[in-house]
Image (spheres, rainbow, N blue to C red):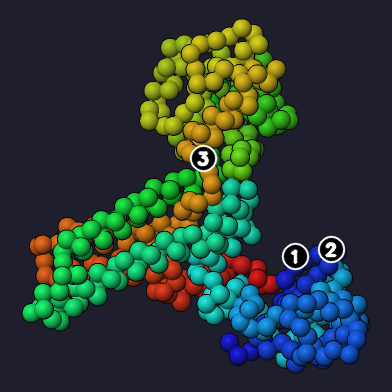
């Protein structure tokens, strides 16, 4: 990492300003590109202070700002220079070209963040949290990403590693000096430490279901007999007319989809064809597709205006699937025992239904501190298996065999803290970023 990298750090296109970032040894390049308004040379800049002046873009000049971040107190841990220029696309590209012509090279995807990781400025999990924040499509994803970026998971992984390392050290001492009968490495202490670690792993793993829904959204399928009010309810939940509403049975022949955000979590709502026996070839295709969509749903929203044996028969096909039973057309005096009673025409009960969708779909209040990355879930799962194997082996195997399982758990946790992550995993993580990050 002795070279200097450069990239445009702001989004492409026109805007108020653009930022071109250089990291490594950028000061000599900046001195050839920036003429400060005053007598202070770039090398003498006070760190973290904006200096106005002219930026040389090679074939043009722009009046902007330059700021120097001194190592190690910078994002990458290296010396960093940023040029803040006017936000025209050609201006930013010209300034970047000028930096490249003076010896910088174009940064790879995520290379600034990768240098921050390699220089110990942030953990691997923290870098993944940053990527989740940048790429998040809902507020809940941003909150979950921020919790990860804030080292929440890293601290827990490192604490468990430290606990396991203490037990490994004690077992090693017992093997090396058996005649000393070292009390701190007793099997009861090892068992207690492993049990505590297993409990912590269980707590983290239990949050993955919620985290996965936060990251991917909750897939909600609206189903029921024809004219149950499915399309009307979809429109009421969304707040605008997305689906065609008609009194004619069979109007909806294909699924209609849209997205609703509740408390920052994305809910993918799918309106389906009315479920009934039909001789119409096209309608039958729509009904079969509706049944397939229900089977793949995270949550079924089953609608009826008046409950019948036909509704019982339909629901029996999806026994065990999370569901909400909704009584529709409250404004017409309809009613039967249900999870929610609504009127799409007047809006009665719609907000309460949204609350139920969140509770049933997400499962608990979201503070953002959930396991959201599949890689983390897999690593914690492997750690749990190794810890469980070690607990089962205590008293039945020798200390040297016991340390193998404990060491395997430590290694698995290191994939989260970054201590044992492979180069291929590290590269894959940083490829999630844009070039300027």
Distance in Å between CA atoms under marks 2 and 1:
9 Å
Q: Position of residue 94 (x, y in %)?
A: 83, 79
Horizontal relation, residue 45 to residue 376: left or right:
right
Question: Is residue 293 shown to the viewer in this render?
Answer: no
Where disc 3 sits, the SS reads: loop
Q: Residues within 10 Å of mark 3 (few under 14, many from 20)?
A: few
Disc assigned to residue 365? 3
**Quadrant showing the N terminus:** bottom right
Query: Which is more foreground, mark 1 or mark 3?
Result: 3
| CA distance for labels 2 and 3 | 38 Å
User: Who is closer to the viewer here, 91 or 175?
Assistant: 175
User: Do residues under tags 2 and 1 come within 8 Å of each other at their CB atoms?
Assistant: yes
Element under disc 1:
loop
What's the residue at 49%, 59% (across, down)? 152
Mark count:
3
Q: Which residue is mark 1?
A: 11
| Location of mark 2 (residue) | 15
| Quarter holding residue 261 | top right
From the top left corner, tell me how far across and down residue 341 is, in percent.
Answer: 57, 17
| Disc with the residue nearer the chain's start (2 vs 3) | 2
Residue 22 on image: x %, y %: 71, 81
């Amino acid at each position: 990492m002795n070279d200097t990298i450069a990239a445009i750090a702001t989004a492409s296109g026109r805007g108020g300003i653009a930022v071109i970032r250089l990291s490594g040894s950028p000061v000599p390049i900046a001195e050839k590109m920036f003429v400060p308004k005053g007598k202070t040379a770039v090398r003498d800049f006070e760190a973290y202070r904006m200096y106005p002046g002219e930026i040389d873009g090679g074939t043009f000049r722009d009046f902007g700002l330059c700021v120097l971040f001194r190592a190690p107190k910078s994002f990458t841990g290296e010396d960093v220079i940023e040029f803040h220029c006017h936000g025209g696309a050609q201006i930013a590209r010209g300034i970047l070209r000028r930096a490249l012509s003076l010896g910088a090279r174009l940064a790879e995807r995520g290379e600034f963040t990768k240098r921050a990781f390699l220089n110990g400025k942030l953990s691997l999990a923290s870098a993944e949290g940053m990527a989740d924040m940048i790429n998040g499509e809902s507020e809940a994803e941003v909150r979950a990403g921020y919790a990860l970026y804030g080292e929440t998971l890293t601290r827990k992984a490192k604490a468990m590693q430290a606990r396991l390392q203490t037990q490994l050290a004690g077992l090693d001492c017992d093997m090396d000096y058996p005649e000393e009968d070292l009390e701190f490495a007793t099997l009861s202490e090892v068992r207690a430490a492993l049990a505590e670690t297993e409990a912590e792993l269980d707590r983290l793993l239990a949050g993955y279901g919620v985290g996965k829904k936060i990251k991917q959204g909750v897939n909600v399928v609206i189903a029921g007999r024809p004219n149950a009010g499915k399309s009307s309810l979809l429109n009421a939940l969304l707040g605008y007319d997305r689906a065609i509403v008609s009194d004619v049975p069979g109007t909806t022949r294909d699924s209609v989809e849209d997205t609703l955000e509740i408390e920052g979590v994305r809910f993918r709502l799918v309106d389906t064809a009315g479920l009934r026996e039909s001789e119409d070839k096209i309608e039958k295709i729509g009904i079969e597709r509706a049944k397939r969509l229900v089977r793949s749903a995270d949550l079924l929203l089953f609608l009826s205006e008046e409950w019948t044996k036909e509704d019982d028969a339909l629901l029996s096909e999806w026994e065990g699937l999370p569901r909400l039973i909704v009584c529709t057309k409250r404004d017409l005096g309809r009613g039967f025992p249900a999870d929610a009673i609504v009127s799409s025409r007047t809006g009665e009960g719609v907000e309460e239904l949204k609350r139920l969708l969140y509770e049933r779909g997400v499962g608990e209040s979201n503070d953002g501190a959930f396991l959201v990355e599949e890689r983390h879930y897999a690593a914690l799962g492997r750690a749990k298996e190794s810890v469980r194997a070690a607990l089962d082996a205590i008293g039945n195997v020798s200390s040297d065999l016991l340390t193998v399982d404990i060491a395997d758990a430590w290694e698995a946790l290191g994939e989260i803290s970054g201590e044992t992550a492979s180069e291929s995993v590290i590269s894959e993580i940083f490829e999630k970023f844009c070039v300027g990050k």
